[in-house]
Each structure stands twice: as C-alpha cells, then as structure tokens.
Amino acid sequence: MIKGCRVDCIFIDDPIQSMDSINILSFIDLFRGLTLLSLDKQLIVSTHEENFHLLLQKKIPSGLFKSTFIEFETFGKLKSS
C-alpha cells in the first residue's frame, strides 16, 4: 500500500471452484447485497467459468448496478462486444 493511499477494492479469484449450483446462486446474492450496502468498495471477480460469468451478468446487470463485465478472447486480448 502506498503511504496515505487506500485501495478500496475486494479482489476475488475463481470463487466457485468447489460450489454446487445452490451455493453459487447464494454467493451471487451475497455480491448483490454487498453492492446494495454501498460499502464504497470495488468488487473485482475473475473466473474461467463461463456459466458463472453469464449468471453474474443476469443477476447483477449493468442497467441496475454499477457493474462492468470484461471477457478475454486469449491471454491479454479483450473480446469484442
């Protein structure tokens, strides 16, 4: 951390590796709750699970939340929308 500068981010890498469907949906609901509580934190989640990515897009849509979804084609190359 740079002296006097806070990083208000929560980084989560591949959080659903060993979860079943019910727990994945509950986990997404937890994300929604965190964003609604206005904790003034940016939540950054990385995953290789396409279905999880699609569920996040449906349950935390950009139109209702301040959410952005990024997808890569290959290493370092963003997928065109």
Image (cartoon, helix red, strand yellow):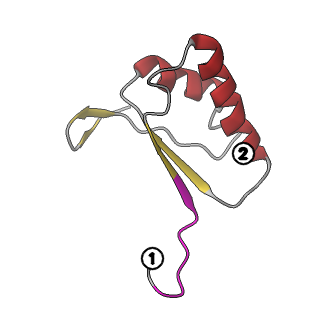
Q: Is residue 22 above or below residue 63?
A: above
| Dot 2 amino acid type | Leu
> Is residue 6 highlighted in magenta?
yes
Q: Position of residue 44 (x, y in %)?
A: 50, 47
At horizontal 45% and vertical 76% (from top left) the residue drawn is 1
How far is the residue under mark 2 from the one under mark 1?
A: 23 Å
| Dot 1 amino acid type | Met
At horizontal 76% and vertical 55% (from top left) the residue drawn is 38
Q: Residues within 10 Å of mark 1 (few under 14, many from 20)?
A: few
Residue lying farthest to the top in this orientation: 21
> Is residue 48 highlighted in magenta?
no
Write down the residue under mark 1.
1
Q: Position of residue 53 (x, y in %)?
A: 48, 26
Write down the residue under mark 2.
34
Quadrant in which residue 23 is drawn: top right
- What segment carries the magenta color? 3-10
Q: Main secondary structure of the magenta part?
A: loop
At horizontal 72% and vertical 45% (from top left) the residue drawn is 34
Residue lying farthest to the front in this orientation: 18
Instruction: Report the disc number at residue 28.
Output: none
Quadrant in which residue 50 is drawn: top left
Left or right, 21 with reference to 3 = right
Left or right, 13 with reference to 21 = left
Q: Residues within 10 Å of mark 2 (few under 14, many from 20)?
A: some
